[in-house]
Image: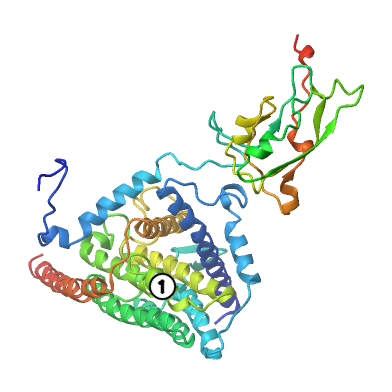
């Protein structure tokens, strides 16, 4: 049969000669390899002190965004929960009262918004489904915890900090 | 026998004992560090700075683990196994000369616990006893894997002790004495080290020492891939810890023996040309001796993380078909050269 590439190597199975049977040259060669690695730069990242940077398109913890006036963007349409393949998102909507216009952008908002981080597969479909650009997976990874209930993240953990644009100017 | 002599020896024994244990303890950390460094990792560095508290943490963990003695095991022998292993490991360092002698208040204090005039034989005897610990432990466990490991340990020790003894005979033909103290005293300076007269004997001796310590590449008694844990499969808690510990103590002692027999022990180059007093020469000598020991311990670890384990038939081939004929050839060669030297010079 015609060979597919020219990389084929025929291994010779000849008996070992005297030097090879002494093992010592091979042992010394191997020791040379290991001692080279001994002085090489270490690949270890000492994690809690040194954190490796996330890649640009890393999908981590979700955050619920605010608009430029600091109002929550989410209108509780439920598309994120619908698109979620792991069914990790639940929400209860509520109507905006008079005098709450500075808190919520639309007339309807999410009174309860919960993501179960143990169910979430960080696929980013909620991000894609959101018509209001209200949810992004731009956080770090989910930290460890002891109880299952502590992995259900509510609005207290998800909604991003209020950000005062005017203070920048 | 004066009281002060006994106190002096007791102090020396305690110091040597504590040193042995501490060095064995930190060998476990060093082993993991060396392993890490050779695999481009950092090794344990969480417990204390650079992980120096790691051995303490490991020891503490061993003490708090559940102690299991299997129902089918012979209880007495099961406990005797690790006991014998650790005792023989500890007593073998008794005849090693750690340094010359100190002058303290007009008294000459020898830095050697016992100057037995058959020191080499004593070490051999104790090493030969060491295999009983492994044998008994493996046999008393009432477990096929343990028994296989124990049988391997026994046959390996017996095979390699022959070659080891033969390589030592060639050395003794050169030194003309069995006393370790005199052997070291003969290797004054640098050019008189026995490694220059017995290079082949040293290689054979070192290979056998690796085998006697059950170190990689000769660690078939505890071959994980075939025998679960080998002779200590059924052991848990501090009894397992003692087995591990005795392995590291053996490594320390055989490093000491190798540097005593072949690398001049406490001797260092130009020791009498620097115009130092006797006490200073002794102190520096002890430090040099420990430096040599640590170098050997590092070498043990270096080999461990370089070479894969031998197959069992390869082990036996190496022992019986290569090392023993080589050792005998070495004896003949040494004899011929000594004869020629004595006749014509």
The residue sitting at 13% across, 70% down in the picture is B333
Q: In the depicted view, which residue is nearer to us: B120 or A162?
A: A162
In the current view of this chain or complex, which residue is farthest to the left?
A: B344
Colour basis: rainbow
- Vertical arrangement, residue A103 with respect to residue B248, above or below: above
Q: Quadrant of the N terminus of chain B?
A: bottom right
In the current view of this chain or complex, which residue is farthest to the top?
A: A169
Residue B153 % position (x, y): 36, 78
Q: In the depicted view, which residue is nearer to us: B206 or B5?
A: B206
Residue A106 located left or right of residue B4: right
Q: From this viewpoint, is residue A62 visible?
A: no
| Residue B294 lies in quadrant | bottom left
Question: Circle 1 marks a residue in which chain?
Answer: B
The residue sitting at 47% across, 76% down in the picture is B232
Residue B79 % position (x, y): 55, 84
Mark 1: few, some, or many residues within 10 Å (few <14, many ≥20)?
Answer: many
Where does label 1 land, which residue? Answer: B222
- Label 1: state its secondary structure: helix
Residue B327 % position (x, y): 19, 72
Residue B317 % position (x, y): 21, 74
- Vertical arrangement, residue A100 with respect to residue B89, above or below: above
The residue sitting at 57% across, 63% down in the picture is B105
- Vertical arrangement, residue B52 with respect to residue B134, above or below: above
């Amino acid at each position: 049969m015609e060979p597919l590439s020219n990389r084929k190597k025929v291994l010779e199975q000849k008996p070992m000669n005297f030097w090879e049977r002494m093992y010592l040259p091979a042992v010394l060669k191997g020791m040379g390899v290991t001692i080279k690695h001994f002085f090489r730069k270490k690949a270890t990242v000492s994690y809690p002190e040194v954190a490796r940077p996330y890649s640009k398109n890393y999908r981590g913890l979700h955050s619920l965004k605010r608009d430029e006036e600091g109002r929550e963007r989410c209108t509780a349409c439920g598309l994120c929960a619908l698109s979620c393949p792991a069914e990790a998102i639940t929400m209860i909507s509520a109507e905006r009262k008079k005098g709450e216009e500075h808190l919520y952008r639309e007339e309807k908002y999410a009174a309860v918004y919960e993501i179960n981080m143990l169910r979430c597969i960080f696929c980013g479909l909620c991000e894609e489904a959101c018509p209001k650009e209200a949810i992004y997976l731009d956080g770090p990874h989910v930290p460890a915890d002891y109880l299952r209930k502590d992995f259900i993240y509510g609005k207290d953990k998800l909604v991003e900090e209020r950000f005062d644009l005017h203070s920048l100017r | 026998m004066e009281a002060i002599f006994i106190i002096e020896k007791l102090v020396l024994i305690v110091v040597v004992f504590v040193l042995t244990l501490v060095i064995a303890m930190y060998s476990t950390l060093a082993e993991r560090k060396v392993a890490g460094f050779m695999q481009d990792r950092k090794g344990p560095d969480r417990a204390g700075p650079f992980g120096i508290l790691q051995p303490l943490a490991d020891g503490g963990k061993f003490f708090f683990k559940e102690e299991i003695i299997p129902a089918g095991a012979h209880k007495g022998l099961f406990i005797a196994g690790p006991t014998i292993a650790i005792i023989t490991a500890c007593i073998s360092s008794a005849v090693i000369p750690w340094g010359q002698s100190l002058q303290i208040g007009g008294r000459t204090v020898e830095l050697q616990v016992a100057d037995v005039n058959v020191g080499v034989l004593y070490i051999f005897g104790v090493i030969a006893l060491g295999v009983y610990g492994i044998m008994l432990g493996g046999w008393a466990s009432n477990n096929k894997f343990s028994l296989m490991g124990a049988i391997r340990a026994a046959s390996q020790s017996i095979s390699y002790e022959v070659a080891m003894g033969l390589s030592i005979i060639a050395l003794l033909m050169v030194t003309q004495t069995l006393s370790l103290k005199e052997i070291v005293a003969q290797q004054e300076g640098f050019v008189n080290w026995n490694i220059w007269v017995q290079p082949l004997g040293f290689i054979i001796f070192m290979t056998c020492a690796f085998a006697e310590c059950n170190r990689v590449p000769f660690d078939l008694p505890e071959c994980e891939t075939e025998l679960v844990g080998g002779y200590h499969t059924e052991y848990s808690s501090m009894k397992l810890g003692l087995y591990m510990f005795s392995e590291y103590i053996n490594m320390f002692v055989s490093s000491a023996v190798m540097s005593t027999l072949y690398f001049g022990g406490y001797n260092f180059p130009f020791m009498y040309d620097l115009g130092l007093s006797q006490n200073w020469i002794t102190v520096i000598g002890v430090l040099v001796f420990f430096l040599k020991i640590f170098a050997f311990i590092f070498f043990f670890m270096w080999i461990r993380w370089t070479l894969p384990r031998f197959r069992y038939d390869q082990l036996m081939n190496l022992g019986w078909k290569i090392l023993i004929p080589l050792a005998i050839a070495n004896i003949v060669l040494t004899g011929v050269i000594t004869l020629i030297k004595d006749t014509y010079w």
